[in-house]
Amino acid sequence: MLQGVEDGDVDALHRTRVASRRLREVLPVLQLDPDVARKLNRRLRKITDRLGKVREYDVLLGFLDDLKKVGRYPKAALLRVAAHIGENRAHARERLLEKVPMHDLHRVAAKLEKIARTLESSSESRVTARHSWRWAIDARVARRASTLAVAIADAGGVYLAERLHIVRIAVKKLRYAVELAADADHVKSSPDLRQLRRAQDILGRLHDLQVLVDRAREVQASLAPPDLNARRELDVLVVALEEDCRHLHGRYMQDRDSLLALSARLSGPVAEAKEVGSQKVKVRRASNA
């Protein structure tokens, strides 16, 4: 996909970003040299973040195109917001190539290929290796599920965009971990993955709508000279988008309990480990006493 990224292909950029995120998920369980894993993870995180800034603008522009076809949003306001986002996208694209030059991306890819060849030729028993990294994957799933449960509890039942954004990130991270576990078991999909994807879709669209609301307000504040018609149209757009946000929040709330149940089930090993650790501490204290 790197050639497509260099050419500005939207799909290539998206797929490269997803690949970088999934690589960050698998690196910690490969039993690499800690320094090598840490450096690679840092470089991949930088790539993910930089690609993400451009990707967000790509998503918003595509989203605006879809809204234009619906007919219930003022088109003039949509065009103003699209122009504003298009300018930001161009700047983000320039910064991407400055901060993460293509030769850096190719270097990281070459390093990853070298690691893959080394792992394939490793003399370690495949059965021993499987037990080791499978345990690491399960622990990662449990930890991510526990984090999601905390995020859902913190978000509560009131529409708070920033807290719901944290839930969205937690859902996405848990999904990547569950996908890794499914790959290890040679399973393409599962009810857990479908539930997480559905939640991510709802929260992702909610996030995009909220970002569009923020961008529309930015455009409104930057109108010079003041244009009353444009301001009114942007007001109408903001109200319509906020109504959509409330509707999607309602869908999230319908799935909230099932998400909590999923998190509790997948984080079971973490809870058990904490309980065992607590019992060990009590035993040591009793012995010392």
Image (cartoon, rainbow, N blue to C red):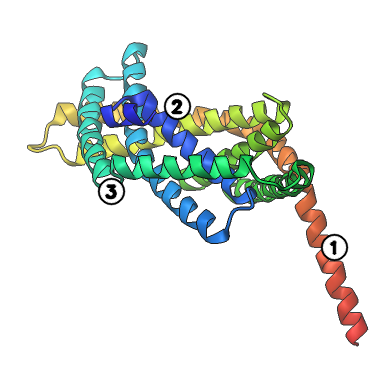
Marks 3 and 1, the one that precedes in the sequence:
3
Decide if residue 173 is in sight here.
yes
- Indicate left or right for 13 with 202 as reference: left
Residue 175: give x, y in percent of width and height. 61, 36
Q: Quadrant of the N terminus?
A: top left
- Indicate left or right for 16 with 286 as reference: left
Q: Quadrant of the C terminus?
A: bottom right
Residue 244 disc label = 2
Residue indicated by mark 1 = 276
The residue positioned 32% from the left and 18% from the top of the image is 65
Q: Which numbered disc, 1 or 2, marks the residue closer to the eye?
A: 1
Inter-mark Cα distance, 3 to 1 = 46 Å
Q: Which of the 4 image quarters holds residue 229?
A: top left
Marks 2 and 3, the one that precedes in the sequence:
3
Closer to the camera in the image, 133 or 53: 133
Closer to the camera in the image, 147 or 105: 105
Closer to the camera in the image, 120 or 187: 120
Question: 64 above or below 84?
Answer: above
Decide if residue 169 is in sight here.
no
Q: Which of the 4 image quarters holds residue 202?
A: top right
Q: Classify mark 3: helix, strand or loop.
A: helix
Residue indicated by mark 3 = 99
The amino acid type found where label 3 is placed reads Lys
Q: Classify mark 2: helix, strand or loop.
A: helix
The residue positioned 11% from the left and 36% from the top of the image is 226
- Indicate left or right for 123 with 63 as reference: right
Q: Which of the 4 image quarters holds residue 90?
A: top left
The amino acid type found where label 2 is placed reads Asp
Q: Are marks 3 and 1 in contact (CB under 8 Å)?
A: no
Inter-mark Cα distance, 1 to 2 = 46 Å
